[in-house]
Image: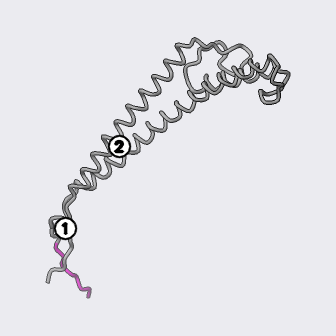
């Protein structure tokens, strides 16, 4: 013979206030939206500024030949081909390896400045993508907090005698 125990479920109000959790969740969602919008704006501005320079990738580049520099990959490829052309002009020597009175040193300096500018744009694209990714995570975490705070009941199982 088995003993069966009768149980009853009761619904109780939560013991702690969850208003702050909901506020934090909502702020997370709003912050995520702001980060995504900011990332899109930065990406667009950097891309349009690069496009406005009308830089065309030469035919001897490793990829994207003939395309206009407008994104992180094309900027990287252009920086790479600038280095290749500059090293060809200097006989394989870097700016620091050239004599101070060597006229090719100015070419190497300009190439270095151009490469640094292109790499700065590549980093800007990366920061914009990072901001958008953190924005998505922030929205997901904020939504999760809001859902947790929206379950304001506690179910307790009690033994009925």
Q: Where in the figure is residue 105, as x and y percent of width and height?
A: 77, 21
Describe residue 106's horizontal placement relative to residue 75 as left or right: right
Q: Farthest right residue? A: 91
Q: Farthest front residue? A: 101
Magenta part of the chain: 1-8
Q: Nearer the viewer, residue 64 or 90?
A: 90
Magenta highlight: main SS = loop
Q: Earlier in the sequence, mark 1 or mark 2?
A: 1
Quadrant location of the N terminus in the rendered image: bottom left
Q: Where in the figure is residue 118, as x and y percent of width and height?
A: 61, 25
- Which residue is painted at 24% across and 85% down in the image? 3
Count how many numbered circles sit on residues in the image: 2
Q: CA distance from mark 1 to mark 2?
A: 27 Å
Question: What mark, if any, has residue 15 been given in the picture?
Answer: 1
Q: Nearer the viewer, residue 12 or 21?
A: 21
Does residue 13 sit above or below 99 in this rendering?
Answer: below
Describe residue 151's horizontal placement relative to residue 113 as left or right: left
Question: What mark, if any, has residue 32 been given in the picture?
Answer: none
* SS assignment at label 1: loop
Residue 84 forms part of the magenta stretch: no
Q: Where in the figure is residue 106, as x and y percent of width and height?
A: 74, 18
Q: Nearer the viewer, residue 78 or 18?
A: 78
- Which residue is painted at 80% across and 16% down in the image? 103
Describe residue 131's horizontal placement relative to residue 57 as left or right: left
Q: Where in the figure is residue 160, as x and y percent of width and height?
A: 15, 80
Does residue 21 sit above or below 57 in this rendering?
Answer: below
The residue tagged 2 is 139
Residue 5 forms part of the magenta stretch: yes
The residue carrying pointer 2 sits among few (fewer than 14), some (14 to 19) or many (20 or more) residues within 10 Å by Cα, namely many
Quadrant location of the C terminus in the rendered image: bottom left
Describe residue 85's horizontal placement relative to residue 50 as left or right: right
Q: Quadrant of residue 113?
A: top right
């Amino acid at each position: 013979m088995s003993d069966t125990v009768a149980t009853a479920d009761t619904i109780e109000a939560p013991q702690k206030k969850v208003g702050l959790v909901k506020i934090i969740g909502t702020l997370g969602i709003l912050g995520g939206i702001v980060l995504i919008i900011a990332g899109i704006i930065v990406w667009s501005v950097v891309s349009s500024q690069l496009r406005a320079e009308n830089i065309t990738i030469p035919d001897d580049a490793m990829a994207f030949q003939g395309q206009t520099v407008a994104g992180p990959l094309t900027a990287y490829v252009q920086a790479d081909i600038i280095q290749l052309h500059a090293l060809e002009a200097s006989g394989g020597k870097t700016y620091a390896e050239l004599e101070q009175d060597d006229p090719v040193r100015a070419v190497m300096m300009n190439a270095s400045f151009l490469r640094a500018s292109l790499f700065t744009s590549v980093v800007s694209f990366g920061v914009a993508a990072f901001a958008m990714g953190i924005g998505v995570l922030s929205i997901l975490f904020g939504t999760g907090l809001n859902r947790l705070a929206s379950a304001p009941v506690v179910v307790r199982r009690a033994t009925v005698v």
